[in-house]
Amino acid sequence: MSAPDVILDVRGVSKFYARTAGRADSVLMRDLPRAVLGLSSKPHPAGKSDIVAVDDLDLMIRRGEAVGIIGLNGSGKTTTLRMVAGQLRPDRGEIVINGRSAAIIALAAGMEGGETGRSNIYIRSAMMGRSRKDVESVADEIIEFTELGEAIDSPIATYSSGMKIRLAFAIAIFTRPDLLIVDETLSVGDFHFRQKCLSKVRELRENSAFLLVTHSMGDVRNFCDRVLVMHRGKVVFEGEPLAAVEYYQRLGEKGRDEDAVAKVARLRGDFIRNDNEVSDVEHHWCDAQGNMIDRLDPGEDAYFRAAFTLRDTPIKPQIGIPIWSREGVYVTGISTLHSDEPVTLTAGRNEFIIKVPGFPLNPGRYESNFSINDSGAFLYRQPNEPVVVRSKPKMFWGVIHLAQQWRRVNHD
Amino acid sequence: MVKKTSSDKADEAPPTLIYRSDDRVKSGFFRPLFILIGQIIRWRWHIMINVRRDFMKVSRGATFGAFWNVVLPLVPLGAYTLLAWARVFPEREGYPAIVYVTTGATLWFLFVDCAVGTMKSVMAKTSMIGQTSYPLIGVVAGQFGEIGFNLAVRLCAVALAVGLLWGAPSWGLVLAPLALLPAIAFFLGLGLVLAVMGSASKDISNIAGVIAAYAIFVSNVIFPVEFAGPLAPISTFNPAAIFIDNMRSVVFYARLESPVSYAIASGAGVLLLIVGARMFYVMEFRIRSYKS
């Protein structure tokens, strides 16, 4: 049993989604007889066919507390909110809510576009369990809070997103819920209205609890007492807002790095080594003397050394060095096709130094492959050691620096 | 502190709500039906708005507007009436063919709308309401606006046919709505069962559609089943045939044609509604999770 001041108690909650329609049908068919006969369904096994949206979540919110949930897209924030709002049931664990709750999750949910704002106050309030008489007593306050003026008697289909959120928020807040659940819809409102909402929420804090999902780090810092960071369905951090935001930002960078690494790996393709055809292969970024390097200054001449032994003379050979940025952007490629003079490869030892005058890539880390193919068939494709273009005080934009000359053509 | 699970009073604002995977499974046998009725009452405004919207959808953009709302339900009825007038169907002693067909077809369409219409509306609208708190039973209740309107239009046509070819019906007419309730319970219950099963298997929804298309010939709708040759014995076990026959005899002769069969079918109807309501209630969140 929860302590009396605990408004929301989420215990070991997990939620799974089927990855395919076939899986969804089979789970429904499996659960149907047991559910009808009054038998509890077996714990849903999360296999390869399932997506684990929320994994073993624990969360407790007491009266007067405002808790935020932040996380990257797909981390399970909205599924958590939808379960707390009663729109979905958990597959494992339980959610206990001590008191009346109100949720603002999807902007249009529970609002009737063809009806006026005024009608929607009654419709949505009825949905939250309030009697007509009860709503009548606060309808004027709600309308005043929304600042919609005469628009309150227009169909809400004509409202902007900001106007809709004003109305939805006002209706929810004036039901005086014990638990207010707010998805990131709040960020739709303009600055003035958001301040007004936050001020109203502060008024209610003594008697209510708040669960807020947002991407606005400002709202998290200013409003929440405690913040959960979710990642891939799990709570990976819980604590003070500032620390949570910092953790989230690191997670975001790490996530971006992981995504970029995966993207580059995908773009690079499979690595190939045909030892019968090509042997004793050496390839690396180097200085003018052929010594291996891993760093360059922006605009500096860059060199690449390649040496290998071919068993046979290839018919239609091509050497390529595709280059990707750290973020997985395919920047450019160096190829024998672009050589000013024809490049020939012969059976036996071949050695090249390729010069790239004024290496034009901006500061950053670059990944590349070295490949040899004959008539389109790869004989060899392996990664090079990454090369880093050092930072310099000048500002730069994007990946490539274009050489440029400025000349003023008018003189007053 | 009063502790209630979400299945107890889902539609009030209970002091404590508990959401669990199986919180509806232990909700008992009869209670789900009353909880679903409570949900309909709570969401009545939304349901009425959806009824109005569905009604307007038929006539939106049409030059003749609401004319189509009236005409379209009469089209299938008119087709069977025309065939009855042309004496295509064998006649039942004691009933003019057109009166027999119009009453039978009106009741048949009502039953099919309750069963197959319920299944189709749930399957079509689950994904739409998946992101909201709107209960699935609201979708079912919402379609009864259209069903009721279509029934009213067809009853006007029946009244005209009866007035012209029969005269005044018996005093049993006043009991007809009461006698119809078990039939509606039966087919609504069947519709709820089909809605759940159809959500899990497209085959079931297709099979239900096929059965509905052919069952009209063995349900005393357009001709008596005794003329259906080897299929005639089906009428003994076909609740649609039992309800339609007994409804006719109540309206025109103020008596039940086969009281025992009617009583058994009525009992089955009430039972099926309770079972269907339970299945629907228990499975709602699974359907919402997997179909939205």
Image (cartoon, rainbow, N blue to C red):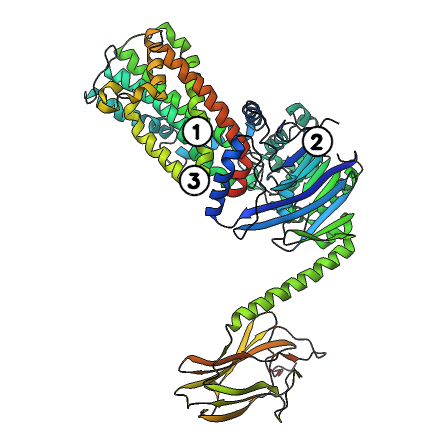
Name the side, left or right, on which A146 lies relative to B100. Answer: right
Residue B191 marker: 1
At mark 2, the secondary structure is strand
**Neighbours of disc 1 within 10 Å: few (<14), some (14-19), many (20+):** many
Three-letter amino acid code at the position of disc 2: Thr
Q: Position of residue B28 (x, y in %)?
A: 58, 25
- CA gap, disc 2 and disc 3: 36 Å
Three-letter amino acid code at the position of disc 1: Gly
Three-letter amino acid code at the position of disc 3: Ser
- Residue receiving disc 2: B16
Q: Earlier in the sequence, mark 3 or mark 1?
A: 1
Report the label total.
3
Q: Chain letter of disc 3?
A: B
Q: Earlier in the sequence, mark 2 or mark 1?
A: 2
At a point 41% along the width and 40% down the height, the residue shown is B202
- CA gap, disc 2 and disc 1: 33 Å
Name the side, left or right, on which B208 lies relative to B273. Answer: left
At a point 77% along the width and 43% down the height, the residue shown is A199
Q: Are marks 2 and 3 in contact (CB under 8 Å)?
A: no
Q: Quadrant of residue B201?
A: top left
Marks 2, 1 in one chain: yes
**Neighbours of disc 2 within 10 Å: few (<14), some (14-19), many (20+):** some
- Residue receiving disc 3: B201
Marks 2, 3 in one chain: yes
Q: Nearest the camera: A153 or A412?
A: A153
Residue B292 appears in the figure? no
Q: Nearest the camera: B143 or A370?
A: A370
Q: Is residue A327 above or below residue A293?
A: above
At mark 1, the secondary structure is helix
